[in-house]
Image: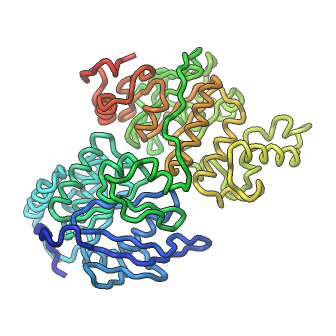
């Protein structure tokens, strides 16, 4: 096949808005799961169509079918009115359909141009890299995807790497671009740049399928919206201008969702966590934390904002005893905590909601009961005379099941069978039931639907009311700014500044300031207004 590398045929006025892709009654099963239950979906020429749904609703599965990665058990796919059957991504690309996955598929040691050429049939024997660099540069300029064709992938930011993935698809002549959770690893400014690029692509005649669970972003970028819930379509092709966030949320989770947080004014108490000039290495032995200092007081939520991979994971681990720091000092209510074991912190009231809820937060093959007693099985009343009392443990687990609305047949069910939202409730129930003095919550709502997110936010605010000190590490900027009393921004293992938002509204200026800090600009170099002030 000869691939059109730079030319694009822009649809005529008659073509714009006409159906490009139709998917009818698509069925896809996995062992024990009906992922797509007779789903219908269509995409028009020159539009951005958002595919919205909670975790596990079937969004990615449906799009993996359209991209040729999966084959459906039944159903029909049509492209430009002609029925097609894709057996591989190559088939889909030949039909003009390409997918940018949430986790990038790039070779770190090769250049941008070399990555874009990977997998192509031509050139076969000799690559004129200088000429190919010019082609890539022209394509990036045309669509506003600024990236140096000669740069190695490891030298690029996450946002620039995403641009390379998009350029790979455009270079192959893609007319429909599927983007799976494209904003998950981007700072606010990078999200704005991405949206500008997507709109420019639509002007050029491309169509975009935007997979997301973020209502605000979907409302900002989409022309039409299709909502999925539990493998079925609950709303098809809604006009984004004619719908609302509450309506979309109701279609996603099947009930009304309250967006307004009941966050009451509260003066912070004494300092609970004090982190002074902490240095630590990551798993590769490279510097991950470079002189981090922060503090958290009783009765407040302190947020840590940053693009993924800037030291957040290591920060949580050194505080909770899962990683050694090379220098610096950590104290809990005045008691030295530096390089102590996880058990030392647990016995002094540290709770931890880890980023990886499956491999770190729970033991998947153990029951709900076993998982919720992991921190209390040594203590009375669950332990008596050094022996575990299973009747007491079961009663305790059933009480948490009711209190935290854990939807499970019984507490003897292995937690590997639970949904993401229910698994997170198990972790929160275990951590909060111990009445912690410090709660370290890392990405507590990642991958959850709006209903589950609402529940997690309520639990965090209840702990704040109870006087706990909460360190909230999240990549969801809206979440941080709505829940936190103060926010620290981390970039390449360094704190870029601290923002006090107790008396501030979440304004565009505040978001812009935090976004600049997330991409490496210290707060003292940013001109700020009254709503944003250094503490």
Location of the C terminus by quadrant is top left
Identify the residue at horizontal 45%, vertical 51% (top origin). 247
**Closer to the camera in the image, 435 or 457:** 457
| Residue 279 located left or right of residue 464 | left
| Residue 149 located left or right of residue 456 | left
Q: In which quarter of the image is residue 419?
A: bottom right
Instruction: Inspect this view and state whether residue 169 appears.
Output: yes
Furthest residue to the front?
242
Identify the residue at horizontal 43%, vertical 32% (top origin). 481
Q: Quadrant of residue 455?
A: top right
Please state the horizontal and vertical placement of residue 180, each as a whole percent of the image.
38, 59
Please state the horizontal and vertical placement of residue 376, each as a whole percent of the image.
77, 38
Please state the horizontal and vertical placement of residue 283, each as a whole percent of the image.
48, 44
Identify the residue at horizontal 27%, vertical 73% (top origin). 19
Query: What colour scheme has been applied to the protein in the rendered image?
Result: rainbow
Identify the residue at horizontal 26%, vertical 47% (top origin). 156
Please state the horizontal and vertical placement of residue 338, each as a whole percent of the image.
58, 25
| Residue 175 located left or right of residue 70 | left
**Closer to the camera in the image, 381 or 191:** 191
Location of the N terminus by quadrant is bottom left
**Closer to the camera in the image, 52 or 331:** 52
- Above or below residue 54? Residue 438 is above
- Above or below residue 251? Residue 392 is above
Q: Quadrant of residue 429?
A: top right
Instruction: Inspect this view and state whether residue 127 appears.
Output: no
């Amino acid at each position: 096949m000869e691939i059109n590398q730079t030319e694009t045929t822009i649809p005529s006025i008659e073509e714009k808005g006409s159906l490009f892709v139709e998917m009818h009654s698509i069925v896809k099963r996995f062992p024990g799961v009906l992922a797509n239950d007779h789903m219908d979906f269509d995409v028009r020429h020159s539009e951005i169509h958002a595919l919205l749904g909670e975790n596990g609703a079937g969004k990615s599965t449906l799009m993996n079918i359209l991209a040729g990665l999966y084959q459906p058990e039944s159903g029909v796919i049509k492209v430009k009115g002609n029925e097609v059957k894709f057996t591989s991504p190559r088939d889909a690309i030949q039909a003009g359909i390409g997918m940018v996955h949430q986790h990038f598929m790039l070779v770190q040691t090769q250049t941008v141009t070399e990555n874009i050429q990977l997998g192509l049939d031509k050139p076969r024997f000799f690559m004129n890299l200088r000429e190919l660099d010019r082609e890539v540069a022209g394509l990036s300029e045309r669509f506003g995807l600024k990236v140096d064709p000669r740069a190695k992938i490891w030298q690029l930011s996450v946002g620039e790497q995403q641009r390379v993935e998009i350029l790979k698809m455009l270079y192959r002549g893609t007319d429909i671009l599927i983007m799976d959770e494209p904003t998950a690893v981007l700072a606010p400014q990078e999200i704005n740049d991405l949206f500008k690029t997507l709109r420019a692509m639509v002007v050029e005649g491309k169509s975009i399928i935007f997979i997301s669970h973020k209502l605000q972003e979907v409302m900002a970028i989409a022309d039409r919206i299709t909502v999925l819930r539990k493998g079925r379509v609950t709303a098809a092709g809604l006009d984004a201008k004619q719908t609302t966030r509450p309506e979309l949320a109701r279609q996603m989770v099947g009930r009304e969702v309250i967006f307004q947080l009941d966050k009451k004014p509260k003066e912070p108490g004494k300092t609970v966590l004090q982190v002074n000039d902490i240095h630590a290495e990551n798993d590769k032995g490279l510097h991950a934390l470079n002189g981090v200092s922060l503090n958290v007081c009783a009765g407040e939520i302190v947020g840590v904002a940053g693009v993924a991979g800037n030291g957040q994971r290591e920060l949580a681990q050194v505080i909770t005893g899962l990683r050694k720091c090379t220098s610096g000092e950590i104290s809990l209510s005045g008691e030295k905590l530096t390089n102590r074991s996880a058990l030392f912190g647990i016995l002094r009231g540290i709770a931890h909601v880890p980023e990886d809820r499956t491999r770190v937060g729970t033991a998947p093959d153990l029951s709900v009961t076993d998982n919720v007693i992991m921190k209390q099985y040594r203590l009375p009343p669950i332990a008596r005379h050094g022996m575990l009392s299973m009747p007491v443990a079961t009663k305790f687990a059933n009480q948490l099941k009711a209190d935290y609305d854990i939807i499970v047949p019984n507490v003897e069910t292995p937690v590997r069978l639970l949904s993401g939202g229910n698994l997170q409730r198990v972790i929160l129930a275990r951590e909060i039931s111990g009445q912690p003095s410090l709660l370290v919550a890392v990405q507590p709502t990642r991958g959850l639907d709006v209903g589950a997110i609402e529940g997690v936010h309520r639990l965090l605010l209840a702990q704040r009311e109870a006087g706990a000190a909460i360190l909230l590490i999240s990549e969801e900027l809206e979440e941080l700014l709505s829940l936190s009393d103060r926010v620290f921004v981390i970039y390449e293992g360094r704190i870029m500044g601290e923002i006090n938002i107790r008396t501030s509204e979440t304004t565009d200026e505040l978001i812009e300031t935090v976004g600049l800090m997330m991409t490496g600009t210290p707060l003292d170099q940013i001109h700020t207004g009254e709503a944003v002030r250094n503490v």
